[in-house]
Amino acid sequence: MRKYIAVLVFFALCFPLKNLAQNKDGSIHVPDTLSAPYIKIKNIEITGNKLTKPSILIRELDFKAGDSLATFQKGRKVNFNDRNFYPGDSSELRLRMNYSRENLVNTKLFLTVNIHLKKITDSEYTLWIDVTERQYWWLFPIAKLNAPNFNEWLRDIQWSDLSVGLFFSHNNLFGLNHQTSVIALFGKSWAVAFGYKIPWVGHGKKIGLLLGAGYYNMYTVEYASVDNKRQMLYAPNSQQSLKLVAKLTLRPGLYHYGTIELTGQYVAISDSMYKLDSNYLAGRKNNNSSLSLYADYYYDSRNSHTYPLKGILLRGFINKVGLGIVSKDVDLFYYGIDFHFYQTISRKWYVAEMVKAENSAGENAPYFYQLNMTQGKDFIRGFDLYTLQGDQMYFCRNNIKYELIKPSVTKTKEGQQKNKFKTLQYAFYLNAFADAGYCVNKFTENNPYNNKFLFSWGLGIDFVTYYDLVIRFEYAFTSIGTNGFFFGFGMPI
């Protein structure tokens, strides 16, 4: 337990809770009075965009120059800095300015976005957008655990289990939000990968393109489960894979998105792996080649993609693994739905819920292709030390949270220029959670938590800071009688 306390003390020392100032990502500024019931946005000015092209910002606005927007609702003055909405409150100006600022924040190009109205006449105004750009290029060392996951590694820390390498990225090439990244990783496991993303191309800028390629040589591989505990092989060249990806992203409306992704993959396992589980890959082979097609459609009105507090995300998806073109090794089909809901219930209290259901058209998929309810974004809290894999999974996560430290920045000294690193942005949220899930696997033996309703509950603290970093500290109790302290990365819901 002492190592957990040491980590908490480290964060307390690094992020002192003092000198708080404005909202961490900016705010909306309007004149004290707006006498006209409608105002016209005469023109748009942008400052602070040293690299980013103005068109990238303008396309995110929920209105355009020349539009007229209502300023009052039933004689009531609008509180522009209040993010909550009330029955009967439908001020067009407030809604559209809020949505526009949130859209700009969600591009992940800016640390802060401030929107101002500057008066020209009583009914005509200039919209002034002032941004602080992020650091766009990065070069730093990275490490990968040759362990099942971070929480298992913490219980038996072995520094020799680390593979190390370098990560390079630029997230705003040419000022057009183009993104490129290169990863090279060496050690017991090693990998090289490259990606290039063009967010929006073509007429209307409603289509995006991503191309990627990667080669992975894994030292640590989960090949089976017994009593829902991971059975691991630790050996050089246990699993090798080559993956090529081409993805189209569609955006027919500001809050409507779609994805079409084509993936080619070659995966091979060592003789040692094959002896341990001959059904690890499809067809009881030691290598598989496949061409897969994934497609989804989703509506996303979340106020923040990093740590949302209001809005909804609704996504439906299908995934055909093995099209029978490159080879006939794999023939699997998955489909599902994913719903997230976020609501402000008072000034400092929030609720969040998510439900996901995913199914496969067949049964008894090879272990490599099974759905996993303890990996990536698919999990229920408190089951980090177990594995839950099968042909179907259904789970939900629920949070009620209290804002301990509001989204804030350390105050900059008077006269000091805005800087990407001199101002630290952070917020802390205390949350109570309750999760539940069910993983269907009719053909597994000696795994008592498959085909069983599972649930967990507990308390946690979320630390949110800039560059999309969310760190979770959680203590969870589970329906199987276990409890413990866990670290998590990324938003819980």
Image (spheres, rainbow, N blue to C red):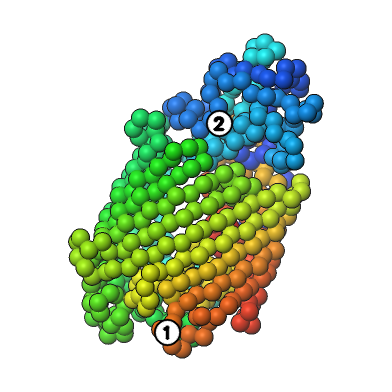
Q: Which mark is residue 301?
A: none
The residue furthest right is 75
Residue at image coords 55%, 56%: 339
Residue 148 on image: x %, y %: 44, 73
Residue 395 on image: x %, y %: 55, 68
Q: Which mark is residue 62?
A: 2
Q: Nearer the viewer, residue 261 or 272?
A: 261
Residue at image coords 66%, 71%: 457
Q: Earlier in the sequence, mark 1 or mark 2?
A: 2
The residue furthest top is 121
Residue 41 on image: x %, y %: 59, 19
State which quadrant residue 400 falls in. Answer: bottom right
Reading the image, the residue beneath label 1 is 444
Amino acid type of the residue tagged 2 in the rendering? Asp
Residue 389 on image: x %, y %: 45, 75
Q: Secondary structure at mark 1?
A: loop
Say if mark 1 contacts mark 2, CB within 8 Å: no
Q: Is residue 320 above or below residue 477?
A: above
Residue 208 in the figure: left or right of residue 281? right
Residue 236 in the figure: left or right of residue 315? left
